[in-house]
Image (tube, rainbow, N blue to C red):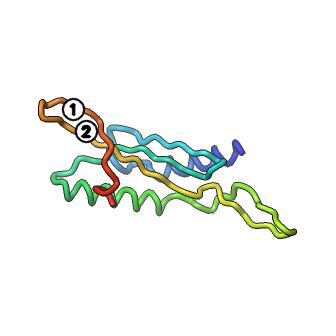
Amino acid sequence: MEDLKTKVLSNVKEAVNGKFDSEKKPAVIFDPFSGIVSIEARAADNFTKSWIRKGIAYDIANTLQAISLDEKGFNYVSDRKSAPVYGIEKVIFVITFPMIDAYGKESEGTIPESVTG
């Protein structure tokens, strides 16, 4: 199981490398029992809200295309038949962005899914 975790983490970290904001390295977490990969990344600051949204969608799409989903976790056996269960079952993105409140205070906030999707 540790071998699978190491392979998936390496694969996903490589896939997300160079995408999103280059000042903050994306965090990658993988739970081999659920098959869920969580990627937390900061959105790159572009000129307008529209460009920021397009940049986020572009970075997510490119990351997903670069992730190898073929890594087998284990084989599920039932009635003498075997079916592979793959290591990655679901990929979750948590995208953050520096936000400034009415008083000029900056904080890191999570972008709502409706903005990115």
Residue 70 image position (x, y, % from top left): 63, 62
**Which class describes the residues within 10 Å of circle 2: few (<14), some (14-19), or many (20+)?**
some
Name the element at disc 1: strand
Disc 1 residue type (three-letter)? Glu
Disc marking residue 106: 1
**Which class describes the residues within 10 Å of circle 1: few (<14), some (14-19), or many (20+)?**
few
Q: Do the residues labelled 1 and 2 touch (CB within 8 Å)?
A: yes
Q: What residue do we see at 57% from left, 45% from top?
A: 30
Q: What residue do we see at 29% from left, 36% from top?
A: 108
Q: Which residue lies furthest to the left in this view?
A: 103
Q: Nearer the viewer, residue 80 or 57?
A: 80
Residue 41 image position (x, y, % from top left): 38, 44
16 left or right of 3 in image? left
Q: Residue furthest right?
A: 80
**Residue marked by disc 2:** 98
Name the element at disc 2: strand
Q: Nearer the viewer, residue 4 or 104?
A: 104
Q: In which quarter of the image is residue 61?
A: bottom left
Between disc 1 and disc 2, whose residue precedes?
A: 2
